Amino acid sequence: MTKWFDTNYHYIVPEFCADTQFRLSATKIFDEFSEALALGITTKPVLIGPLTYLKLGKTPEAGPPGFDRLALLARLLPVYADILRRLAALGAEWVQLDEPVCSLDLTDAERQALRTAYAALAAAAPSLKLLVATYFGGLRDNLGDFLRLPVAALHVDAVRAPREIDTLLREIDGTKLLSVGVVDGRNIWRSDFTAVSPLLAKARALLGDGRLLIAPSCSLQHVPVTLRHEGKLDPEFKSWLAYAEEKLAEVVALRDLLVGIPRSELGLNATAAASRRTSARIHRPGVNARVRGVAAADLSRAAPFLGRQARQRERLRLPLFPTTTIGSFPQTDAVRSARAQWKKGTIGRAAYEKFIEAETLACVRFQEEIGIDLLVHGEYERNDMVEYFGEQLEGFAFTEHGWVQSYGSRYVKPPIIYGDVERRQPMTVRWSAYAQSLTARPMKGMLTGPVTILQWSFVRNDQPRRDTAFQIALALRDEVLGLERAGIAAIQIDEPALREGLPLRREEWKHYLEWAVNAFRLSAAGVRDDTQIHTHMCYAEFNDIIEAIAALDADVITIETSRSNMELLGAFVSFRYPNEIGPGVYDIHSPRVPAIDEMEQLIVKAAGVLPLENLWVNPDCGLKTRGWTEVRPALLNMVAAAQRLRVRFGSPTAAPALRS
Ligand code: GLN
Ligand code: ZN
């Protein structure tokens, strides 16, 4: 599975090889069309276009060298042609083919393939009207080829790329229809009719009534279904939102307003837009002033890495190949049920916290017993690594029914960042300080980073994402300093979503990475030299972003490498990554317990290419989804592997020292 463009929806990546054959193996699209038709509704079936299908697939590495998936187009098109003919025979008038790859960087060969494909498909079912849709970004250098596709209509994303509309209107040929996606299908905000109407009026003036279609910017799959059941949101906040049903109503209302049919919600729409501009719940005096006041010095640790490393070694006194974990320990049924009872009110806050304390204590004792060097508290108090912080920060809202599809039948309910973000009180200090009070070994504080919080939420659309990220970063910076004051000597700031925030177009990567890195640094850089900052990312494709990863300047980074057999460390090696690094040795996606030898060998491999005194021994990611029956032996083996490594590389097995 991989993420669908820059959404949080995952699809299964099709794999193609040189002898792949295509044939129609499902009747879903025909059955559903016929079912609707029998009810008197002629629908517009929607298919992934052939270029998007091929481009988003992958070619297994074992394939013949030089094999190009585009070569499969000739074999694929007859199947598409067959589908189109059958839909036409069933009575379809329109079919939509989605080609969102038109918002990506395409090669000349890919643009050529796009033209070839649609020339063939247009000829295959001449009675059918084809609508080719792109979304999630502008067309840019693909605009000319897209405009000239020999189809009846084109759809574009006017939310993400409003500035291209003028060119499209000017250059579209005299017979094509243009579908203008003006209602944001990617976010939960209500449209601002006064902002959108002029664009539609211009399009209408240039195209005439018969050639303008009004639409959501993309599929509504990426927003929740309906606001109707959100009974607990207060009216002002609710007035700012639109889910899929409300977005469809907006499309219709915009059409009516355009042609002069009065709509009663026009007033409400204007009131909502005005209140978002002025509401004191959104605009908190001081927050943006603090963001504007961020100075270069706030983004840098006082001393360079080598100086800090020496101070941290003195303070932490960890052995060579120190062992640690990524944060969470098994979220057992007991933990989940205690949280559910507390949320329902069956047990009180005190009883719940007592329960969490007992779990934390058991987790700390377990780590001490097996000999982990840098401990964690286990994250039992957290439901989710973003929600936990969002619930305690100003500017975040949580809905009852704001579910969106993540993959298959799995849904997530992202928080909504609607206003200036502020930290009211410490969020994690209580748990980290409690855990530290139980042990003489160092306890690692555990936070979710600003980019990950941003990336896994619905984000406000009235200021740049960068500004929101900086607001979150400042709140986290205060938390980091609170942890430091509470005596926590190592603090991990997780950024598993840093990579998935990369813009779709390469030319925008630099700008994104610059502010994303700075947001992380802003959250981390306030600490003393002898406080060790960790970060964690659960992937290991770092080749193209390694400079940015190094620029985070975390003292330690833990990454996911066990399944790739350390191949993925390559980026760190060729870059000569200077700071400490924990390449994961335990694949936490599997119930399998890795053997001592296996984990030892992985680190031996890493030690062959990276300075061994910079290496940590840890799992790939948190242990939240695993059971104790696997975690116990796996971590025991992991610690044994580290001990063997210390012997092998000739360093004394220093006993974990007392905290300073
Ligand atoms: N600290 C988190 C945990 O251990 C990190 C999770 C993640 O990287 N997705 O669960
Ligand atoms: Zn992870």
Image: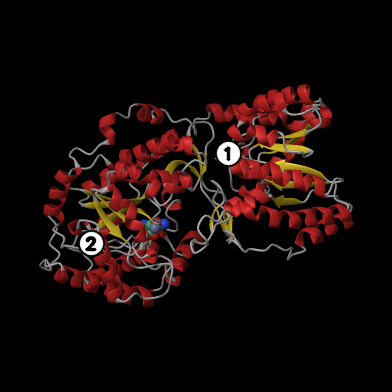
**Position above or below: 378 against 513:** below
**x and y, in percent, of residue 447 in the image:** 34, 51
Mark 2 falls on what kind of element?
helix
Q: Which mark is residue 172?
A: none
Please say whether residue 429 is visible from this viewpoint. Answer: no
**x and y, in percent, of residue 73 in the image:** 67, 53
Q: Alpha-carbon neighbours of circle 2 within 10 Å: few (<14), some, or many (≥20)?
A: some
Q: Residue at x 82, y 28 (%)?
A: 209
Which residue, given by chain and number where applicable, does mark 1 sit on? 237
In terms of image quarters, where does ligand 1 lie? Answer: bottom left
**Position above or below: 86 against 109:** below
**Position above or below: 369 against 261:** below
Amino acid beneath label 2: Ala
Q: Residue at x 88, y 55 (%)?
A: 89
The verdict on label 2 being within 8 Å of ligand 2 is no
The quarter of the rendered structure image containing the C terminus is bottom left
Amino acid beneath label 1: Phe
Where residue 197 sits, quadrant-wise, is: top right
Which residue, given by chain and number where applicable, does mark 2 sit on? 607
**x and y, in percent, of residue 14 in the image:** 59, 60
